[in-house]
Image: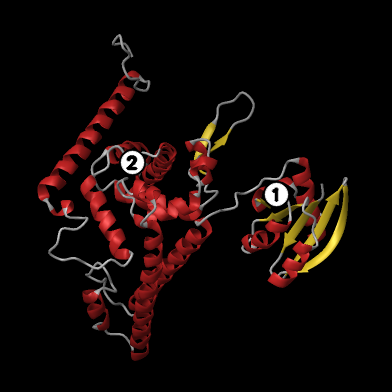
């Protein structure tokens, strides 16, 4: 078996072949579809190719994979930790990839399949637009601050009342013109973001897993799609701890010898976009009653609000793994809130508003149903608090009573 190591750059890739323990340089390959296709055609069907996970690695895999036995994508961070060397060239990097793969020490990353790559790209586009719109607001705020304008009394500075207030401030003419340009750019990006969200919603509408995740309080269409795009297939994670570690929500551990293990902050390794979405979902979940809010309050009382939100984000990751693995909805979900989320998903996908008619969110508009939902969530919160009090009282976790009444 021959192993081909490719050290990928922006305009070229260095190729090294490892066969029978001997490394041989194959030369450089231009990073164009035509050159990569010609290089792939020169490979043997029994070859194994190893590349690092870079921005264009997915396109390289797409071209080479049909021509060889297997293409492995290496985790670049872990490869550098394993194969750090004083002498570093492209040829050496390509040879190291091939040697690590041959020895069985190559830390690989999962190659997304199905619709996962497209979903990841759409989520990334939306995140970039959101950050750009936030930046435009910050620029306008800095202009007003530079000219001693007071704090805006309105919640949204780019809303209807907020814009009227901004344009009424006393600033130089050139600054006023800049503010108007930033507002126009904000509107343009808002319209573009809605189109991206429409594509995301249309793809998510028939997805049963997205709807399942939306049964969790605080998880809307954006969070559900973003998390599913990061996870791909849940069966590639053997446990909930593996999923939380993949999202960078697992606490770091330091231990030496027989000494105690010290747990520190979360590792922040892995899918940062999904991790941020889960933290945002955690902040939303604590605004409504339920066992999730009770868990947050317990952590917040000891460690503070921010640690509590991160702990709840990890709890959501564990919960998501169990829900997806068992194909079950959230047990303490609120049907009326879910109906509202589903209706917002339908509207984002391009459905026409049906004013005056009974739609998906009709139950949410009935006060008695909303109150019944909230009462059920409050009972779940009280049940969690009773369990926590038992932990604190006995110093051990609660265990259900057995058939004979003993725990």
Instruction: Pick the residue in front: 212 or 393.
Output: 212
How packed is label 1: few (under 14 Cα within 10 Å), some, or many (20 or more)?
A: some
Q: Which residue is drawn at 68% across and 56% down?
A: 52
Answer few, some or many: residues within 10 Å of disc 2's Cα (few below 14, many 20 plus, some between 14 and 19).
some
Q: Residue furthest top?
A: 404
Left or right of 354? Residue 396 is right
Residue 89 visible in the displayed image: no
Name the residue at 31% across, 40% down: 292
Counting from the top left corner in percent of width and height, residue 116 is at 51, 56
Labels in figure, total: 2
**Element class at badge 1:** helix
Q: State the residue position of label 2.
A: 329
* Residue name at image x 22 percent, y 55 percent: 360
Q: In this view, does 11 lie above or below 322?
A: below
Q: Picture coordinates of residue 373 (x, y %)?
A: 18, 43
Residue drawn at (84%, 61%) of the image: 26
Decide which of tag 1 and tag 2 comes sooner along the chain: 1
Residue 395 visible in the shown view: yes
Which label number is shown at residue 90? none
Q: Determine whether 258 is above or below 86 in the image.
A: above
Whether residue 368 sits left or right of residue 227 in the image: it is left
Across and down, in percent, residue 14 comes to 78, 63
Return the residue nearer the eye: 170 or 91.
Answer: 91
Quadrant including the C terminus: top left
Q: In this view, does 380 lie to the left or right of 304?
A: left
Residue furthest out toward the left: 368
Of circles 1 and 2, which is in front? Answer: 2
Closer to us: 326 or 128: 326
Q: Where is residue 62 in the image (x, y as percent from the top left)?
A: 64, 60
For disc 1, the marked residue is 79
Cα gap from disc 1 to disc 2, whole angstroms: 39 Å
The kind of secondary structure element at disc 2 is: loop
């Amino acid at each position: 078996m021959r192993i081909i190591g490719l050290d990928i750059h922006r305009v070229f890739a260095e190729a090294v072949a490892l066969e029978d323990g001997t490394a041989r340089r194959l030369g450089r390959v231009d990073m164009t579809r035509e050159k990569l296709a010609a290089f792939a055609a020169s490979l043997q069907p029994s070859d194994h190719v190893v590349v690092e996970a870079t921005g264009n690695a997915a396109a390289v895999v797409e071209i080479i994979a049909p021509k060889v036995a297997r293409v492995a994508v290496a985790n670049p961070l872990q490869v550098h930790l394993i194969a750090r060397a004083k002498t570093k060239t492209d040829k050496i990097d390509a040879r190291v990839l091939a040697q690590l793969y041959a020895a069985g020490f190559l830390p690989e990353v999962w190659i997304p399949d199905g619709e996962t790559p497209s979903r990841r790209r759409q989520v990334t586009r939306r995140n970039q637009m959101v950050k750009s719109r936030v930046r435009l607001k910050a620029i306008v705020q800095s202009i007003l601050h530079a000219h001693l304008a007071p704090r805006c009394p309105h919640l949204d500075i780019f809303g209807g009342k907020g814009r009227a207030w901004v344009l009424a401030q006393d600033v130089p003419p050139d600054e006023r013109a800049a503010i108007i340009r930033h507002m126009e750019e904000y509107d343009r990006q808002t319209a573009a973001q809605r189109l991206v969200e429409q594509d995301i919603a249309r793809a998510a509408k028939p997805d049963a897993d997205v709807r399942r995740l939306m049964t969790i309080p605080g998880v809307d269409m954006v969070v559900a799609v973003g998390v599913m795009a990061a996870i791909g297939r849940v069966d590639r994670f053997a446990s909930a701890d593996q999923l939380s570690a993949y999202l960078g929500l697992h606490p770091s551990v330091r231990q030496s010898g027989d000494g105690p293990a010290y747990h520190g902050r979360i590792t922040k390794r892995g899918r940062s976009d999904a991790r941020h979405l889960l933290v945002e979902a955690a902040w939303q979940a604590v605004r409504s009653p339920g066992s999730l809010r009770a868990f947050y309050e317990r952590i917040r009382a000891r460690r503070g609000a921010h640690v509590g939100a991160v702990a709840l984000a990890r709890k959501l990751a564990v919960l998501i793994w169990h829900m997806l693995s068992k194909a079950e909805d959230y047990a303490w979900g609120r049907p009326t809130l879910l109906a509202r989320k589903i209706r917002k998903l339908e509207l984002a996908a391009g459905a026409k508003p049906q004013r005056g008619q009974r739609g998906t969110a009709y139950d949410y508009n009935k006060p008695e149903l909303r109150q019944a939902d909230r009462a059920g969530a409050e009972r779940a919160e009280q049940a969690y608090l009773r369990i926590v009090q038992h932990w604190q009282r006995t110093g051990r976790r609660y265990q259900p009573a057995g058939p004979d009444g003993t725990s």
